[in-house]
Image (cartoon, rainbow, N blue to C red):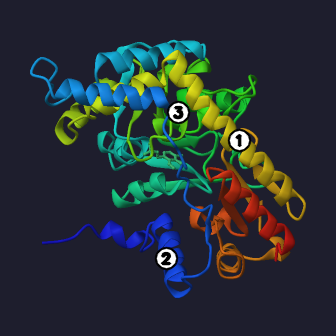
Amino acid sequence: MKINTNFEKMPQNYLFAEVGKRTSDYVKANPGKKVLRMGIGDVSGPLAPVVVEAMQKAAAELGQKQGFRGYPPYEGYDFLREAIAAYYATLGVRTDPSEVYVNDGAKSDAGNFGDIFDVDNAVLMPDPVYPVYLDSNLMSGRRILYMNGSEENGFLPLPDPSVRADIIYLCSPNNPTGAVYTREGLKAWVDYANDQGAVILYDAAYEAFISDPALPRSIFSIEGARTCAVEMCSMSKTAGFTGVRCGYTIIPKELSRGGQSIGALWLRRQATKFNGVSYPVQRGAEAAFGKEGYAQCMEAIAFYKENAAIMGKAIGSFTKYFGGSQSPYIWLKCPNGLKSWAYFDYLLNDLQIVGTPGAGFGKMGEGYLRLTAFGEREAVLEAMERIQKAPF
Ligand code: PLP
């Protein structure tokens, strides 16, 4: 019996598990201290009222003989696939409901999509990066190429025609840096992928935070994307579903490689390893895309964006930062040239604020720290007061 030795290539702990462990160790050792958590990107809720109503109604239906349902379809109920396609239409993007694959969150698809691709593919991803893309490809033993995000390129690397890649991960608005690709930037990636026959796995988990109409909210608003891209999105941040669990992936009909339809391969994979999302959750997600539900979800997003603006103002008074205005993340440069984990430890031990060390997202993240804007207003104000008084 042999274990998968690729695990030896990965950091021992998943980044957020490490942040959680250091925080809980601190809390255990200092029970009286008020710790303000701005590390893990979890929302503070609550769910939109129409979403709750829809889930309650769906649960009641399941309690009736006529309304009972068993296993859901692998790719999601038609009512939700249609609601998602209709939502894309409001963004000016054409997608057919049959191209929508419902899942239990974008992390699952971001981590699992590699199942349908050969191990012998070169994977290109940004550094800093959302760790799921990296760790899942390390686990399966793929060759990884990095493209550096830096202050010079605004943490938005563009394609280098001399680099050959087969699978490309892009995330916009970006986790962790909050940077958002322009239409021109995405067009450069789409052209590069089509030229190389590569596939872009585009993570749009934070698209609902984009309010600047000049910025693209879907890669499918870019000409040519339907022949080279898959888009993954999540209800977690759009509708506060981090605990409810629902997301979706869009795979255009035109997308095929090696003579095989990517959508058909993905459905084959899902039918083997995934048994669908529960009916009440899908009804809740459908409600979030209704007129009233979406307006209620947008109120929560506006609130988090106000948090980000408050944080940006406070942090900008003592150091440089990125992100914030079109995303829930503030990516700040650690003051006085501190390294990421050193600044993390200072904030935790001296100010009782939890961030996420930039170095945990890759070597280019060293010297930066990520704060999230998903907290309660009171906690955000208190954290900013503490940090402004004693940035370091
Ligand atoms: N993609 C990105 C970029 C994320 O930051 C996250 C969560 O933080 C996810 C995907 C996972 O989302 P979900 O809760 O839908 O699994």
Q: Which residue is mark 2?
A: 24
Q: Which residue is mark 1?
A: 305
Judge the density around disc 3: few (<14), some (14-19), many (≥20) Cα neighbours within 10 Å.
some
In the displayed structure, 231 sits above or below 36; it is: above
Could you tell which of marks 1 and 3 lies nearer the N-terminus?
Answer: 3
Decide if residue 19 is on the left or right side of residue 74. right
Residue 258 in which image quadrant: top left
Q: Nearer the viewer, residue 306 or 16?
A: 306
User: Between marks 1 and 2, how big is the CA–CA gap?
Assistant: 28 Å
Total residue callouts: 3
Q: Secondary structure at mark 3?
A: helix
Residue sticking out furthest to the right: 317
Q: Quadrant of the N terminus?
A: bottom left
Residue type at the position of mark 3: Gln
Residue 347 locus on image (x, y percent):
70, 75
Decide if residue 309 is on the left or right side of residue 268. right
Residue 266 locus on image (x, y percent):
30, 32
Residue 174 in which image quadrant: top right
Q: Nearer the viewer, residue 375 or 143?
A: 375
Judge the density around disc 2: few (<14), some (14-19), many (≥20) Cα neighbours within 10 Å.
few
User: Between marks 1 and 3, how big is the CA–CA gap?
Assistant: 38 Å
Could you tell which of marks 1 and 2 lies nearer the N-terminus?
Answer: 2
Q: Which residue is mark 3?
A: 196
Residue 202 locus on image (x, y percent):
52, 36
Q: Nearer the viewer, mark 2 or mark 3?
A: 2
